[in-house]
Every structure is written in C-alpha cells, then in structure tokens.
Image (cartoon, grey):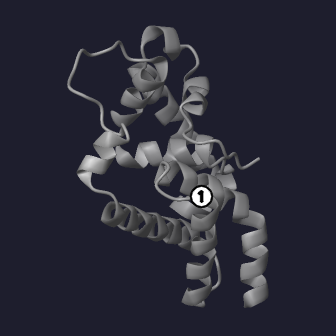
Amino acid sequence: MDETIEAFETRYRQLAVVTCEWRAFGVADPEDLASRVFTQMRMRRRPPTLAAFYKAVEEVVAVAYREASAQNSFLEGMLRGQLRGFGKRQEKTDDELARAALSGLRAREVNWLRQAFWDELTPDEMAEVNGGTPEAQTKRVDETLCRFGARLPEHLADDPRAAMIQIHPGEHRRH
C-alpha cells in the first residue's frame, strides 16, 4: 500500500503545492501543506484517490487557518496592512473585477473553474473528483466559463479563460 501512496504522491505532488497555495493565500508554506496532505492520506490507510486527496487538502488548509488565526491578532493584521482602511475607495483593478465575477457564481461552479484552470486537472481527473464522465466535466467547465464571462466587464468578457488564468493566486503552477 505504501508504494501506491508513494506513486500517487510522486504523480500529484505539484498539484498539492498549487492547490494548497491558492487555498491558503499566504497563511502557510504551500510545500509544507502539501507534505501534510500526503501524511494525512498515509494515515487513512486507504487506496489514494483524487477525491480523498481533495478532502485531505481541505482539512489540511483548514488546520493551517486555525493555526494562523491562533498566532495573529486582529491588531497585528491591521499593522501588517492585511486589512484595508476605510478611506477613499480606489477604482477596482481588472483582477478584482474578475474575482468579483467569479464570486457571483455558485460554489460548485467556482470549484469546477478552479479545478480546470488553477489546479489544471484534466477532464478525466475532474471526473474522478466530481463524479460523472470526462465529457460531462468539459461541458460543465465550458458552460460555467460562459456564465463567468457574462459577469465580467465588457473589456474582459472577450476572453474569460485568460481572465480566469490571470487571477490565479500564487506563483506555483502544476505543469
């Protein structure tokens, strides 16, 4: 069984780093979080799957947020500039507008776009995580991308794929 988990980790290590990075948003080191994901998967002693992988990612990232919040007070966050002041509002950037459009979608739709564009899952991998066929995953992503594009400002709506890729948080990429 350890060989199966080792092979799974070799195959999906970079995906773990990417996924943890954009979900943790600077709260913890994505490489460390990725290691925690595979440690947690080893403790479960079940054959590794992408569905189990994503469950482990969610749990590891949740723990990282709890650890970070226990270490940082509200005042410390303000002093480090993590919270914006209540002063004059500046015009939103294209990235902020795209993130606002993304936040207007249903949670599962956002998840499909994140899996396709930020995690760079193939339709086969998405089918393993979400259920259904690879063709159904492609259709879901295409339809959701159209809804995302309809929510974008006119100057960004011509290429919703580019807008989705542009707003990827973090530096790590899977491929």
| Quarter of the figure with the N terminus | bottom right
Q: Residue at x 51, y 46 (%)?
A: 112
Q: Is residue 28 above or below residue 106?
A: below
Is residue 79 shown left or right of residue 111? left
Q: Is residue 42 above or below residue 89?
A: below
Q: Secondary structure at mark 1?
A: helix
**Which residue in the protein does label 1 denote?**
30
Q: Where in the figure is residue 29, as x and y percent of width and height?
A: 57, 58
Q: Where in the figure is residue 67, as x and y percent of width and height?
A: 39, 68
> In the displayed image of the protein, which residue is found farthest to the top?
155
For badge 1, the amino acid type reads: Pro
Quadrant of the rendered image containing residue 10: bottom right
Quadrant of the rendered image containing residue 139: top right
Q: Where in the figure is residue 57, as x and y percent of width and height?
A: 52, 66
Q: Residue at x 71, y 50 (%)?
A: 174
Q: Residue at x 56, y 13 (%)?
A: 158
User: Is any part of residue 125 visible from this angle?
Assistant: no
Q: Is residue 68 above or below residue 150?
A: below
Q: Residue at x 53, y 31 (%)?
A: 167
Which residue is nearer to you in this view: 133 or 123? Answer: 123
